[in-house]
Image (cartoon, rainbow, N blue to C red):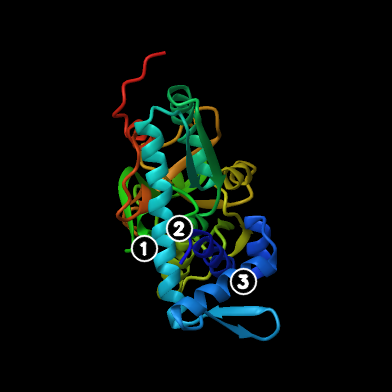
């Protein structure tokens, strides 16, 4: 079993076909086919089964080899990073993904600090939805992801970072601003700006409205808090959002946030990562910067 064969098999399995794997690894399809056949001959079993003309699927043996290859490649990459660090070579990569709001409001200063501390690190930042971040972590395509704790699956590790809560955004002079504890029946009297039906908050809201037998009108769907706030400020409707409990700065906005913690439990923005991963120091320091554990001098 040769290293190139393992790499070739891994990408064919991960990308679901020889064509995409060939493009990703800069090899010909025939070369990848030869590598996979060589592995099947050596292991004396089929690794893929064909479904139709172009689709393939891992066999049970192929699934076991894929898991082995994934762990081996991940450990190899971390070994190379550790070796470079040991040799004093300034070389490494750090890949991070988070939703737009997190990237826009919470990370710029910390990214800037980290880049000054490690200018030689190839830093990649991806703007992705919560579910996409989790998928990228599972696949090993990123090192770290920022997502809500309630969405983190058991196969990932995470560290709590900042507490959040679900609120409604209204105009500063809105009638509901005077209420000590706003009820859903009161909210439903106004046009609503809600997250898409695929969002966890929307699912919870729909369930609550249905349980209470409340009818409501949706005038807009938005997955972006900034976008929702603009249309709320225009007077289009009441918007629901998940925000930091410490509250963003809205001094120059004609908005007010009203907590719905009597309906929804608190959640947390977390730093998620794969289990059993040992990071080199340049990756660990990003975590330390995120949690203000690194003193940084200008």
Of residue 28 and residue 20, the one placed in the foreground of this image is 28
Q: Where is residue 213 in the image (x, y as percent from the top left)?
A: 45, 75
Q: How crowded is mark 3: few (under 14 residues within 10 Å), some or many (20 or more)?
A: some
Please give left or right for residue 12 compared with residue 287 in the image: right
Q: Earlier in the sequence, mark 3 or mark 2?
A: 3
Of residue 117 and residue 39, the one placed in the foreground of this image is 39
Q: Which residue corresponds to mark 1?
A: 153
Which residue corresponds to the image point at 36% horizontal and 63% vertical from the top-left? 153
**How far, Cα to Cα, is label 2 from label 1?**
8 Å
Front disc: 3 or 1 = 3
Q: Which residue corresponds to mark 2?
A: 134
> Is there CB contact under 8 Å for labels 2 and 1?
yes
Which residue corresponds to the image point at 38% horizontal and 52% vertical from the top-left? 75
Q: Which of marks 2 and 1 is nearer the N terminus?
A: 2
Which residue corresponds to the image point at 31% horizontal and 21% vertical from the top-left? 295
Label ID, residue 34: 3
């Amino acid at each position: 079993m040769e290293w190139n064969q393992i790499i070739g098999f891994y990408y064919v399995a991960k990308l679901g076909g020889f064509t995409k794997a060939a493009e990703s690894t800069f090899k010909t399809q025939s070369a990848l086919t030869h590598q996979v056949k060589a592995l099947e001959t050596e292991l004396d079993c089929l690794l893929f089964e064909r479904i139709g003309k172009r689709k393939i699927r891992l066999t049970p043996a192929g699934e076991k080899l894929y898991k082995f290859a994934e762990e081996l490649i991940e450990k190899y990459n971390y070994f190379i990073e550790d070796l470079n660090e040991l040799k004093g070579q300034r070389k490494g990569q750090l890949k991070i993904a988070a939703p737009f709001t997190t990237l826009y409001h919470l990370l710029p200063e910390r990214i800037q600090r980290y880049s000054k501390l490690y200018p030689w690190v190839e830093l990649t930042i991806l703007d992705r939805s919560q579910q996409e971040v989790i998928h990228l972590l599972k696949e090993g395509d990123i090192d770290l992801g920022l997502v809500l704790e309630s969405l983190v699956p058991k196969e990932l590790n995470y560290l709590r970072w900042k507490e959040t809560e679900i609120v409604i955004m209204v105009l500063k002079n809105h009638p509901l601003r005077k209420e000590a504890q706003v009820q859903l029946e009161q909210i439903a009297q106004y046009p609503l700006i809600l997250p898409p039906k695929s969002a966890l908050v929307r699912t919870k809201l729909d369930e609550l409205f249905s349980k209470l037998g409340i009818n409501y009108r949706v005038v807009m769907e938005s997955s972006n808090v900034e976008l929702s706030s603009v249309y709320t400020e225009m007077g289009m409707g009441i918007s629901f959002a998940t925000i930091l409990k410490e509250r963003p700065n809205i001094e120059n906005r004609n908005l007010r946030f009203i907590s719905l913690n009597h309906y929804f439990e608190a959640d947390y923005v977390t730093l998620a990562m794969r289990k059993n991963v040992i990071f080199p120091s340049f990756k660990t320091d990003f975590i330390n910067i995120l949690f203000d554990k690194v003193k940084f001098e200008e």
